[in-house]
Structure formats: structure tokens, C-alpha cells
Amino acid sequence: MSTPRHDTIAVTGATGELGSRVARHLAERDAPQLLLARDPARLPRLRGAQPRGPAAYDDGEAMRVALDGARTLVLVSGRPTGRRLEEHATAVEAAVAAGVERVIYVSLLGAAPDATYRNARDHWLTEQYLESAPVRHTIVRAGIYASTPASLADHDLVVRGPGGSGRTAFVAHEDIAAVIVALALDAPDDHEGAVLEVTGPEALTLAEEVEQVALASGRPYRYEPETPEEAFDRRYRLGLSGEQIEAWISWYLAIAEGGLAAVTDVVPRLTGAPATPVSAIDWWPPPGRAS
Ligand SMILES: NC(=O)c1ccc[n+]([C@@H]2O[C@H](COP(=O)([O-])OP(=O)(O)OC[C@H]3O[C@@H](n4cnc5c(N)ncnc54)[C@H](OP(=O)(O)O)[C@@H]3O)[C@@H](O)[C@H]2O)c1
């Protein structure tokens, strides 16, 4: 039997957009991996990848069993606003119990206790938890996905919200995945305890970003600015919870503030390739997918 060239890497969220790309890149590099899912039947079938689960982040025992044999865990963050800390902490505790030595956590750019974007406050809580967790870790703060405006658009392809004229360095899923894979495979010790901010190559206003999405996707997306009051009224009438409304409006307000505009060198430095401009992205989600 041949000895694997790499330690076994566990990847969560591999039924989703980011985790599936990480898994595909790892398979292309012949890395042995465990793919964890709540529904393993939905996992991609990849060379060198074992499906594991069912394992939800908040089920510590199922996570521990599913992680058996892994040395590194790529923890793609879960979605429920306000529950991320509990879910992620349970997953990390299970990883430690299973013998995982290193966690790469996918956080969010701007994570801070006083962040404007609601979800960035959520991610900060997990980052704080990791600071004192008994495991080596690297935090990957993913920039705002270039694809998000396409999923926020309504069925007439209109993106409405209070995005103002602040700039944001929107980033491609593929680039974030490539950074994670470089971390997982190539430079395990160099980035211990590091916080890496992964951005696209240019800072765009939301209006410019939506224009670029339209060009790249070939679909006529357009942006219509709203005031925060108009945005609130529209979402409230849709019957969304206060938490959902806050998460949604604060995404636009964080962009309007311009605090996510810095372009970092993380993508070229770790992957050896330039970050992908929005105009060159070739995958776009259908409209109406984000709530
Ligand atoms: N940077 C940004 O702009 C941005 C934008 C949106 C989201 N995010 C964050 O980035 C994460 C990854 O993004 P994505 O595009 O890959 O999202 P996605 O396509 O919705 O995938 C999320 C993945 O996480 C899994 N997951 C969610 N909650 C889980 C739980 N409690 N236990 C186990 N697995 C769970 C999902 O599994 P199932 O298939 O079972 O649901 C799915 O595989 C999101 O979950 C969110 O936290 C970042």
C-alpha cells in the first residue's frame, strides 16, 4: 500500500458552493479527504474522498465519529444567524476529541464585535472561541462573495437595497477555495494563528458590481438603490423575522460604509495566481436564492 503524500483533510459544507470547490481542488491535488455532510448522499463523488455523516455541526458525537482519521479540518461556516457560535464550537470540540490537529475556519471579512454586517458579528464570536480552543487554527476571512448580488436579485433581476456608493472588493468562490487548499496542503505551519483576509482584485460600488455581474453572466441584472427605511418596509411586509431583516439590510449598509474596500494580496500570495475579477467569473446562482 502506498503512503499518502498528504495528511487526511476533513472538509465540511461540501454539499455547498464553497466546500464543494475546496473538495474538488483537493481531489485534483490527490489529497486524501473526508467529506462531511448532513446528507452524505448529496456529496460529490471524488477521487480520494470518503463521504462521512450524517453529521450536523451541533451533533458533537456524529461529528466526532465522522472526523475520525482527519488531521486537518476545513470548517465551512454554517448559515443560521445567531446560532453559528454554538454550532461551530460543538464542531471544533468534536474535532479535538477526534484527534484533529488543525482547524481552518472560514470566517467573514470585517468580523468584529461592532461590525455593521450582522453576520460579521456572528463570525467574530467563532473567531474568539477559536482563540482559546485547544487546537492550532487559521482563520480565513472571506470577502463578500461576488455572487451574492445575483442571489439577492428578484425574479426581474433587480438588486434593491441601501448599498450607497461605498466600495467593496467582491471575491470569487473559486479564489477563496484555492486559498483554503493552499493552506491545507502547502504551508501548514506558516499560517498558524493567522487571520487571512481574502478579497477580489478591485473595489467596486454595488452599482458597478451589479453591472459586472450582468456582463459576466449575460443576464440583465440591475441595481436600484433604496433608503434603509424603504428596505425595511419591503422586507417587513414579506414577513421576515427581525434577525433576517437585520442580516439582509446590514449587508447593504456595510457595503455603503466602504469598510470592505481594501484589496489584499492573499489570493496571489498563497495561490500564485491573480485574484479573479468579477467580469471573469463563470458561475452565477439563480436569482431569489438568498433570503
Ligand atoms: N463571504 C460571503 O459573502 C458569504 C455569503 C454568504 C454566506 N457566507 C458564509 O459562507 C458559508 C459557505 O458559503 P457557501 O456559498 O458555500 O454556502 P452554501 O452553498 O449555502 O453551503 C453551506 C454549506 O454548509 C453546510 N452547513 C450549513 N449548516 C450546517 C450545519 N449546521 N451542519 C453541517 N453542515 C452545515 C450546508 O450543508 P447542507 O447542504 O446540508 O445545507 C452546505 O454544505 C455560508 O454557510 C455562510 O456562513 C459567506
Image: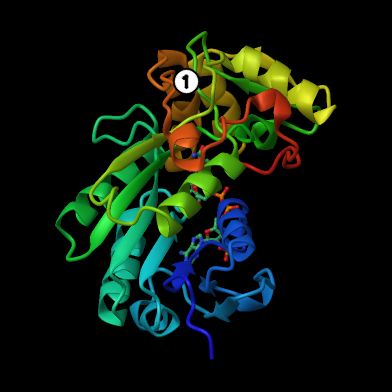
**Disc 1 target residue:** 255
Where is residue 14? Give x, y as percent. 58, 63
Identify the residue at horizontal 72%, vertical 42% (top origin).
285
Where is residue 259? Give x, y as percent. 37, 18
Position of the N terminus by quadrant: bottom right
Position of the C terminus by quadrant: top right
Where is residue 255? Give x, y as percent. 47, 20
Q: What amino acid type should be assigned to the residue bearing mark 1?
A: Ile
Q: How many marks?
A: 1
Residue 16 falls in which quadrant of the image? bottom right
Against 168, residue 145 (above or below) is below
Identify the residue at horizontal 52%, vertical 11% (top origin).
164
Against 73, residue 222 (above or below) is above
Does the rendering let one see residue 110? yes
Residue 40 falls in which quadrant of the image? bottom right
Q: Residue furthest front?
A: 2
Q: Residue furthest top?
A: 165
Q: Nearer the viewer, residue 80 or 149?
A: 149
Identify the residue at horizontal 23%, vertical 55% (top origin).
130
Q: How is the image coloured?
A: rainbow
Q: Secondary structure at mark 1?
A: helix
Q: Residue furthest left?
A: 132
Q: Nearer the viewer, residue 255 or 27?
A: 27
